[in-house]
Amino acid sequence: MISLGNIFLDNQDSITEVRKKILSVLKILTGDRILATRIASVTSQMGRSLYHGPLKSQLVFGLFRGSGGVGFSITFMTQKKLLKTDLTQAFFDEICSLSPKGDWNRVQGIIWLDTIELPSPSVVEKIRNILKGKNRQQLMAELEQNNQKLSKSLHELQKTTLLKDKMSSLNVKLKQENLRMGAQLELLREMQQLILPKLDELASIEDLDIAGFMEPADEVGGDYYDVLYTDGVVTIAIGDVTGHGLESGILMVMTQAAVRTLQGIKENDPIRFLNTLNQVIYDNIQRMESEKNLTLAILNYRDRKVSVSGQHEETILFRKGGEIERVDTMHLGFPVGLCDDIAEFIDHYFFELDVGDGIVLYTDGVVEAMDFNKKQYGIERLCEMISHYSDRSAEEIQKVIIQDVYQHIGEQKVLDDITLLVLKQN
């Protein structure tokens, strides 16, 4: 076994970096972009499920020669009591549960490479360097240290009159640049708010009682939702762009425009709808030279019948009386913008609504909201709130859930956009 290193899942940034690193490594080892994208995506999803605040989790990587040739292994290790493997079974060539190692529960996924020869030492070293690369939080910490050192040095140099004059000029330029960037971000934020569904639009849909909420964590967020009504068909979209800031906000606006265009030309086939939208977003991401992507679910409603397509957070269906049904969208699609064709990954799920039944859609900012002790709000608490208040109106359900989420966060900084959409059959 050749050890390639490990990644501790000790913060949200490390989980985000997992996908990028595994994508790069598997492109080197296999040359198969689609395989690399699949494994990177599912490993990132598994990493999110393992990350649990104070409980430690890590991924361990290795290369070995076995009966099937040369294998690349990813060992999922966690101190959580249960380690689910259903996310990985459909993507790895082999999945095996390993015996616990101390406090660590272990499951190993194996990809057999199309070779019988181990990579050269130079390739192995290149892979190790990729996997041990610093994540955003570590780089930001180093940047903060360097900024502090620079600030101290500048403070000493500012004692001279000449440098004070130069610093004054630089400060003026910096303030002007900050004002310019701030104006751009504020304009994009206002645009995002303007294109959200208006209350009178939602009220015009007679069969459904609908209430939505979206609050970005930064000036510009990456969350998105829309509700469109044409010829008796209600199209509901909800998505989450990776990261925040200008690029994420622009991608969110692009997605909204693409969804409205496809809905406007009455493209009702879910596979063509999502794959065409993905091709547009993928091309724009490549043009931007960005690594952004997004999860996106599309729901179509007509005469109490609902279809769900696309990969996003779980769709929560509640029945009159409070019974909860959770629809896992993991196998209904693929992240939008990661590759140019996702048709083979798209599927749909159907259900019907009776009077008093409803649907709750949300982004990860709701269930991953943390309190002072780093405890997440969680899907179970969300479902309990929905069940308890299921007899209320859509607006009342939305308001009590959002209030409960912010009570859970308390005085902590809100780290992610928070979006919630409630629909109820009249």
Image (cartoon, rainbow, N blue to C red):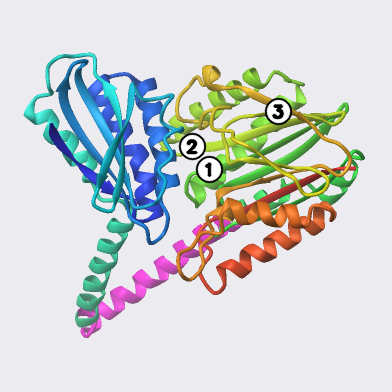
Does residue 4 lie above or below 399 as drawn? above
Q: CA distance from mark 2 to mark 3?
A: 20 Å
Foreground mark, 3 or 1, reads 1
- Is the C terminus in the top left, top right, bottom left or bottom right quadrant? top right
* Secondary structure found at label 1: strand
Q: Is residue 153 left or right of residue 343?
A: left
Mark 2, residue position: 293
Q: Position of residue 268 (x, y in %)?
A: 73, 20
Mark 3, residue position: 261
* Secondary structure found at label 2: loop
Mark sitting on residue 241: 1
Q: CA distance from mark 2 to mark 1?
A: 6 Å
What main secondary structure does the magenta stretch of the protein show?
helix
Q: Position of residue 111 (x, y in %)?
A: 29, 23
N-terminal-most mark, 3 or 1: 1
Report the residue at 37% width, 56% height from top.
11
Residue 183 sits inside the magenta stretch: yes
Q: Position of residue 107 (x, y in %)?
A: 32, 37
Corner quadrant of residue 143: bottom left
